Amino acid sequence: SVFRNCANVGKTVDGVKKSITVSSKSQKETGEDKTGFVGGILGYGSAAVEFYNCVNDASITINASAYQTGGIAGAIYKATRYFDGCVNTQNGDIIYAMGIAGTMRGIAGILGYSYNEDGTNGKYTTIKNCQNDGDITQTDDVGNTIMMGGIVGRVESTGTNSTGDNAAEGK
């Protein structure tokens, strides 16, 4: 899949800009470890995917457990990923506010989680000329391992690389 020149600018309702918000009261009450994927452009991908000049200009708030979250893409599994010229703007703040103890989550301005199993050599992540200006914030205090980054939050692979001129300017 190829995404070119796409933007998530949020929805304006009565002059107020809305954002992406994920919440689940039942997850916290039952203690189940449910997984979800949230991204400003793509939540989850499991095939080769390329992003060119994509922009997320909406904030993302996670009030539910076990979410991989990115300003552009939440998670991409077992596939080649390519990001060039993508931006998570200063309006693209990402707030992770709830989780279940013992879970590991990736949160970042461009790609939340990149994963390749052993044996999927040749499937690389390339990120170049990308920028994150949004704040990445974690308020979850239940003992999660939260991997946060301006560009990439979490990588699991023997063949993943990140190259190029990238910048992260959020808090």
Image (cartoon, rainbow, N blue to C red):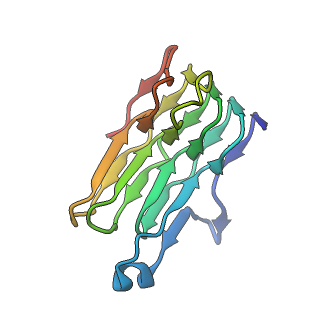
Look at 43% across and 36% down and name the residue there: 156
Left or right of residue 140: residue 57: right
Which residue is pictured at 50% across the width and 47% down the height?
92
Q: From the top left corner, tell me how far across and down residue 58 is, in percent.
A: 56, 52
When asked about the image quadrant of residue 122, the answer is: top right
Residue 135 in picture, x, y percent from top left: 38, 45
Q: Is residue 134 left or right of residue 54?
A: left
Residue 155 or residue 164, whichever sits in front: 155
The extreme top residue here reads 164
Query: Total of numbered circles in the picture?
Result: 0
Residue drawn at (37%, 85%) of the image: 30
Q: Is residue 132 above or below residue 104?
A: above
Q: Where residue 161 sits: x, y (%)?
A: 49, 20
Out of 67 and 103, give the one closest to the viewer.
103
Tell me if residue 72 comes above or below residue 29 in the rendering.
above
| Quadrant occupied by the C terminus | top left
User: In this image, 79 relative to 20: left or right?
Assistant: right
What is the quadrant of the N terminus in the image? top right
The spot of residue 96 in percent (x, y) is: 37, 59
